[in-house]
Image: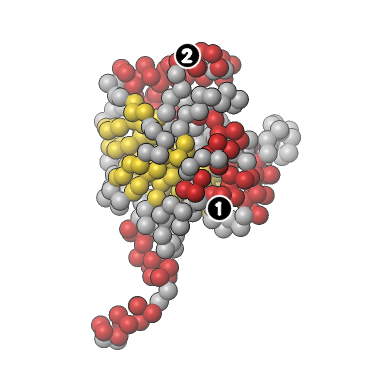
Amino acid sequence: MNAFIALIVLAALPLMAVQASYGCDDTFTVWQLPSQSRNQMNSYVMQTTGGKVIVIDGGNTEDADYLKTFLRARGNHVAMWFISHTHYDHVNALTAILKDPGQLKIDHIYASLLSDQWMSKYGLAEEQEPQTLDNFKKAAQAAHMEITDLELGQVLKLDGVTIGILGVSNPEIVENGVNNSSVVMRVWDHYKSILFPGDLGVEGGEKILHGQYKDQLKSDFVQMAHHGQNGVDKAFYQVVAPRYCLWPTPQWLWDNDMGGGKGTGPWVTQEVKSWMDELGVKKNYYQFDGLQRIQCIPRQSAEPGK
């Protein structure tokens, strides 16, 4: 087949099929990291086509060494580190790393922190909320790292990847307050989009659904809120309309196993899974299956609202 005929054949192929053949090398990679303990945790690492690294959360203190090793293999340089909220299973790995970074370099840390005053009034001592925030801030200060406050509607760009901030802290919501102040991020390029709602609850989700950024929620992938249960409600996921789900969920939570076997706990993970089945989700990526790597899917456009 000569070059002219080959071009005609290529042009006749559907756009999505063409993108599937070459898009994988032209889109960012995301990894869902496994927990290094029995505890639930949230940890995502992304790498752009140019090799720049973005981290979301990081997990518990027990996850810090694994995360450092993972980042060392990818250049030991994080361009952007986002903290969704300051619960220990999201921020403590970074707190530990800031105390002992080794050769790891971090350019920027981003968050939307609740105030010390809010935390002293509404933070739950039994869940270590005030102390976890204080430890994180002190570790950043000792490491001479500034925590950059995110703004609603802010857009950040890095090496072909765009990050839109669709939700920030909600100090007016005191019910499930720290979770409901999770940063909500949409990450996308020309090939795929991923929504990261952290541990956002029903109240925080409803605020977004009634706000100006509702139309930007739709994404190919969604990180399941609050580890897949007791997070945002079904209406939120219906607007996101994901085709793929990322579950930062340990086996016991997936099985609703409080120690007496499957179904013996109070968690509603399987109900949320049934919502995803109703939405026609094509594939689920489970944290309890180990390290998950996601790169290319066929996609015409991942621009917001498309």
Label 1 packing within 10 angstroms: few (<14), some (14-19), many (20+):
some
Q: Residue 52's spot in the image, x, y percent?
A: 29, 44
Q: Residue 245's spot in the image, x, y percent?
A: 54, 49
Residue kind at label 1, given as amino acid type:
Ala
Quadrant location of the N terminus? bottom left
Q: Tell me what residue is drawn at x 71 percent, y 39 percent.
A: 262
Image colouring: secondary structure
Label 2 packing within 10 angstroms: few (<14), some (14-19), many (20+):
few
Which SS class for mark 1?
loop
Q: Which residue is mark 1?
A: 241
Q: Tell me what residue is drawn at x 63 percent, y 45 percent.
A: 234
Which SS class for mark 2?
helix
For the residues marked 1 and 2, what is the alpha-carbon distance in whole angstroms?
A: 37 Å
Residue kind at label 2, given as amino acid type:
Gln
Q: In terms of depth relative to the viewer, which is nearer, 209 or 293?
A: 209
In the displayed structure, would residue 277 be above or below residue 168? below
Q: Tell me what residue is drawn at x 59 percent, y 33 percent.
A: 203
- On residue 117, the disc is 2
Q: Tell me what residue is drawn at x 29 percent, y 28 percent.
A: 102
In the displayed structure, would residue 283 be above or below residue 198? below
